[in-house]
Structures are given as C-alpha cells and as structure tokens.
Image: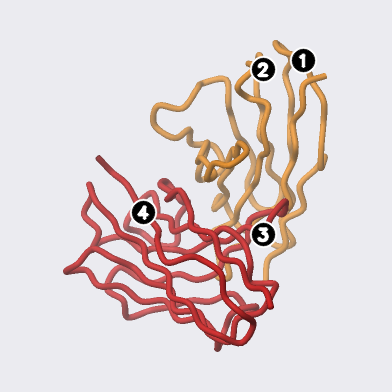
Chain colours: A red, B orange
C-alpha cells in the first residue's frame, strides 16, 4: 500500500525547534522528490520545501529559508523537516507529498494525512 | 515567485450543473499546472496534472485545459461529493505556488 505518514508535530513556543518526519512505504522512495506543504487553520495551501530524490538538492519557500532544513534517508525511506526559530505563523497542518513521476518538479500524487504544529507562547 | 490567481473565490451550484474555475499565472508556466480537491479535515487530492491529464482512476466529469498563463478546471454534471475546495498549483518553477482556492458550495 502506497502511503506517507507524518509524525513529530505538536506544541512549541516561539523561537524553539521541532522536527517532523515523513515515513514512506509501498513505492520506490529513492527515485522521487519529496515535498512539505503546510496549511494554517482555515487558510490555503503553502508549499514549504522540497528535497531531490538523492538528497543533493533542496528548495525552500522564502518564508522558511534559513530556519527550516529538509533532508531524507533513502535507506530508511524517510524524509525530515527540521524547523528552528519557530514563529506563530508557522502553525498549521504539515503534509509531506510525493510527486507523480521521477521527473521533478511535478504534481503531488500522494499526500500524507498531515501532522499539526502549534506555535504559541 | 509565480503568482496564481483563481476565480471565482467561491461559487454555488446545484447537483447536475456544470461549473468552471479559472487559474491565471503571473507568467508562462507552459502546462505545469495541477488541480486539487480538498475536503474538510483531509489532505488535498490530485485531480489533474500537466493542465489536462486526469489522475488515474479519477472521475471523467473533471477536465482541464489551458497552457501558458490561463487554465480552467471544468466539472460536468456535479455530484454531491464534488462540493469542496479546489486549488490550482504550478510546478514549472521553484518556489512551487498554489492558487488561493475556490470554495464550491451547494446552492
């Protein structure tokens, strides 16, 4: 069964760090780029970051550049999002997503169920 | 960053109607556009990619068209399960961007 499962969300204070994980199964993880997308409560979708199939290339939204780090471990079929210097505006549901094809960038064919991050003092 | 403007932001329709949602990009994205449907409490679900290609197994009442800067999503013969939020997304250039969304409600 093809699936992505996020974990690691929770409550955090502004200025602190949190690490999210995305566990993949059911497909050849090592050939697809992985993305993180977030959605603040009642708001639209915001792309956050992407990591290439081999982990050598990373891309970030301006809103998180310098604060978030995306990475992957193909042996463990897992992607991660390390978030630091958190702000209240970083709150929301964080989804990881897999592309349609191995030719990146591409549309997001598969999404996880999401993990909630709540940054508040 | 490439901006995507969706219109309308909301619309009301009845079961059986045909509706069209448009998405305009601030610069050419060729055909690198996808449409997603999202229901409350659920992740987005890919409907179409490369502007006009229906995701495998997706309902054929959904269709997409356009290239360059102007795109449309058409839903024929609306079904009760189609009332949801719809987003367009460009993946031509990083940063990847989404439209602001269109809420489709039952009239």
- The residue identified by callout 4 is A5
- Report if the CB atoms under discs 1 and 4 are less than 8 Å apart: no
What residue is shown at x 58% (from left), y 70% (from top)? Answer: B95
- The residue identified by callout 1 is B14
**Seen in the image, is A51 located left or right of residue A16?**
left
> Mark 1 or mark 2, which has the lower sequence index?
1
Q: Position of residue A88 (x, y in %)?
A: 69, 74
Is label 3 on the same chain as label 2? no
- Report if the CB atoms under discs 1 and 2 are less than 8 Å apart: yes
Q: Secondary structure at mark 2?
A: loop
Mark in front: 1 vs 3? 3
Numbered circle sitting on residue B73: none
Task: Report the Cα–Cα distance between label 1 and label 4.
Answer: 36 Å
For residue B85, what is the image quadrant? top right
For residue A106, what is the image quadrant? bottom left
Residue count near mark 3 (Cα–Cα under 10 Å), binned few <14, some 14–19, many ≥20: some
What residue is shown at x 50% (from left), y 41% (from top)? Answer: B46
Subunit of label 3 = A
Q: Secondary structure at mark 3?
A: loop
Numbered circle sitting on residue B78: 2
Subunit of label 4 = A
What residue is shown at x 63% (from left), y 24% (from top)? Answer: B82
Mark in front: 3 vs 2? 3
Subunit of label 2 = B
Numbered circle sitting on residue A40: 3
Where is A49 relative to A26, above or below?
below
Residue count near mark 1 (Cα–Cα under 10 Å), binned few <14, some 14–19, many ≥20: some
Where is A102 relative to B19, above or below?
below
């Amino acid at each position: 069964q093809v699936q992505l499962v996020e974990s690691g969300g929770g409550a955090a204070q502004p200025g602190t760090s949190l690490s999210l994980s995305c566990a993949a199964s059911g497909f050849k993880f090592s050939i697809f780029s992985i993305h993180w997308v977030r959605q603040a409560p009642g708001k639209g979708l915001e792309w956050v970051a992407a990591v290439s199939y081999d982990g050598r290339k990373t891309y970030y939204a301006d809103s998180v550049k310098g604060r978030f780090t995306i990475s992957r471990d193909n042996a463990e079929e897992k992607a991660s999002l390390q978030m630091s210097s958190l702000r209240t505006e970083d709150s929301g549901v964080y989804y990881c997503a897999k592309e349609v094809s191995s030719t990146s960038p591409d549309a997001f064919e598969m999404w996880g169920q999401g993990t909630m991050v709540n940054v508040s003092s | 960053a490439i901006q995507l403007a969706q219109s309308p932001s909301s619309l009301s329709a009845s079961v059986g109607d045909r509706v069209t949602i448009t998405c305009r990009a601030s610069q050419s994205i060729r055909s690198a556009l996808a449409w997603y449907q999202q229901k409350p409490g659920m992740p987005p679900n890919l409907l179409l990619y490369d502007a006009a290609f229906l995701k495998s197994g997706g309902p054929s009442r959904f269709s997409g068209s356009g290239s360059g800067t102007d795109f449309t999503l058409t839903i024929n013969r609306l079904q009760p399960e189609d009332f949801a939020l719809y987003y367009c997304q460009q993946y031509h250039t990083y940063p990847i961007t989404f439209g602001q969304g269109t809420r489709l409600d039952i009239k």
